[in-house]
């Protein structure tokens, strides 16, 4: 459940729908699914092997496995990357918290549909409100792992993941009843091959990496807690399928609503915060109570999904500080909070006070997101598979891929993919990211 929690998050609800919109709908979904099963899943296994065999945080695992100075730097990069991602991810988490409060307060029922979408621009262009919600979300994120692995992360995951699937199923069933909704279903399921491009493939692979938390140190850290009797291949398949199914359910919830609202599906990161309020406001014209209930359920789903992933992101830094610096879990959590908060201010203000600042033509938050998924995570994933395929002993890797040391055809096939297919494909994607 914790692995699934790291995979199911804002990447599925916030990022997947607008990336699908920008990538031409079903074609993006097909490439995303293929990338998840053929590339991301073997990378997941490689990182799992590092974590369970190393038995420690990212840096500690590399040291325990005999990695030299270069590989220790890789371990440190795997600690930095999730902290960097969490800095802007918590800002979007703050947006979901703000909109949950708006939904509970009936804000969408009290405005005209034409004004609902403008609420988002007014909110993110402010100064105090984005900082307050970002801070609150980050603080709540840190409270969960501060309680420990079993009492905090494990207990939270056991409750939150099943609840997420139930709520998203209910919401998907509802949005499919909206007038014009099936145009969104058709968009999601009918591929438009004219949209095919190197950039689209790179974005789909980046989304797949983001969805399975690859190249972030999360899988390495969580795997260090996994019992030797656990079959990593089975766990990986379950995690990948959970991420795929939830992404499709999120698409079936949001894209039909986008078409029902007459909004452009490639509207960007603010898609769900601009389009869905329009739907809820329209609904309130005839059924105000239903509008409050459905909007509250939706943004509760977004918030819980954000938390399941943000908890895993911050745990990487906490594990490193506890094991390498000897800090207590409480002090490590506070330090992670402080460091992430300082960097996150840039993203929190990227549409307001820093609205004129552009990095390669994009707002700060968007640029951080693209750099993380297309560069940082890709580089870390590449180094991970190279280490497992060419540095670790083959027998150690295959043994870890089984359970209780038992191996089979499946373990050897996964090893082949890790050693030969994954490095070649990741290199191609990394080059494509620079070209596009």
Image: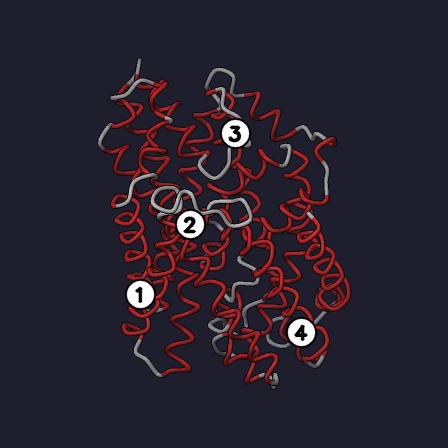
**Residue that numbered label 4 is attached to:** 388
Q: To which quarter of the image does residue 391 belong?
A: bottom right
Task: Tell which tag, 2 or 1, sits nearer the viewer.
Answer: 1
**Residue that numbered label 2 is attached to:** 161
Q: Is residue 186 above or below residue 342?
A: above
- Element type at marker 3? helix
Classify residue 1 as left or right of residue 74: left
Frontmost residue, 48 versus 313: 313
Mark sitting earlier along the chain (4/1): 1
What is the spatial separation of the Cα atoms under label 2 and label 3, in whole angstroms? 22 Å
Q: What is the quadrant of the N terminus in the image?
A: bottom left
- Element type at marker 2? helix
Q: Are marks 2 and 1 in contact (CB under 8 Å)?
A: no
**Residue that numbered label 3 is attached to:** 255
**Residue that numbered label 1 is attached to:** 338
What is the spatial separation of the Cα atoms under label 4 and label 2, in whole angstroms? 30 Å
Mark sitting earlier along the chain (2/1): 2
What is the spatial separation of the Cα atoms under label 1 and label 3, in whole angstroms? 36 Å
Q: Is residue 83 above or below residue 360?
A: below
Q: Residue at position x 66%, y 65% from top?
A: 382
Total marks placed: 4
């Amino acid at each position: 459940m914790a692995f699934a929690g790291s995979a199911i998050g804002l990447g599925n609800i916030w990022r997947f729908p607008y990336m699908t919109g920008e990538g031409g709908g079903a074609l993006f979904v097909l490439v995303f699914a293929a990338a998840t099963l053929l590339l991301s899943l073997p990378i997941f296994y490689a990182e799992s092997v590092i974590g369970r065999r190393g038995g420690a945080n990212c840096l500690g695992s590399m040291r325990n496995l005999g990695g030299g100075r270069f590989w220790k730097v890789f371990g440190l990069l795997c600690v930095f990357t999730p902290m960097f991602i969490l800095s802007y991810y918590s800002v979007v988490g703050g947006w979901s918290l703000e909109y949950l409060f708006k939904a509970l307060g009936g804000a969408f029922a009290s405005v005209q549909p034409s004004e609902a979408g403008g609420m988002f621009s007014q909110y993110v262009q402010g100064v105090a409100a984005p900082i307050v919600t970002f801070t609150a979300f980050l603080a709540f994120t840190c409270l969960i792992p501060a309680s420990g692995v079993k009492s905090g992360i494990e207990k939270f995951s056991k409750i939150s993941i099943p609840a997420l699937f139930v709520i998203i199923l209910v919401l998907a069933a509802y949005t499919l009843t909206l007038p014009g909704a099936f145009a969104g279903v058709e968009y999601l399921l009918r591929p438009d091959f004219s949209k095919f491009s190197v950039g689209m493939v790179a974005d789909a692979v980046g989304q797949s990496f983001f969805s399975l938390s690859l190249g972030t140190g999360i899988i390495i850290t969580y795997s260090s807690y996994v019992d030797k009797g656990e079959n990593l291949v089975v766990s990986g398949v379950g995690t990948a399928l959970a991420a795929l199914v939830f992404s499709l359910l999120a698409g079936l919830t949001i894209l039909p609503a986008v078409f029902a609202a007459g909004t452009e599906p490639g509207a960007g990161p603010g898609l769900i915060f601009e389009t869905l309020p329009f739907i809820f406001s329209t609904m309130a014209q005839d059924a105000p109570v239903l509008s409050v209930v459905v909007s509250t359920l939706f943004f509760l789903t977004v918030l819980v999904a954000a938390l399941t992933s943000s908890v895993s992101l911050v745990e990487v830094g906490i594990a490193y500080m506890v094991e390498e610096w000897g800090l207590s879990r409480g002090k490590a959590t506070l330090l992670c909070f402080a460091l992430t908060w300082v960097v996150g201010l840039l993203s929190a203000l990227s549409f307001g006070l820093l609205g004129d600042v552009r990095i390669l033509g994009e707002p700060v938050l968007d640029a951080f997101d693209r750099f993380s998924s297309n560069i940082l995570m890709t580089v870390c994933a590449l180094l991970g598979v190279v280490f497992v395929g060419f540095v670790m002993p083959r027998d150690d890797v295959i043994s870890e891929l089984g359970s209780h040391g038992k191996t089979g055809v499946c373990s050897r096939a996964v090893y082949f993919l890790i050693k030969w297919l994954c490095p070649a494909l990741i290199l191609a994607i990394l080059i494509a990211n620079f070209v596009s």
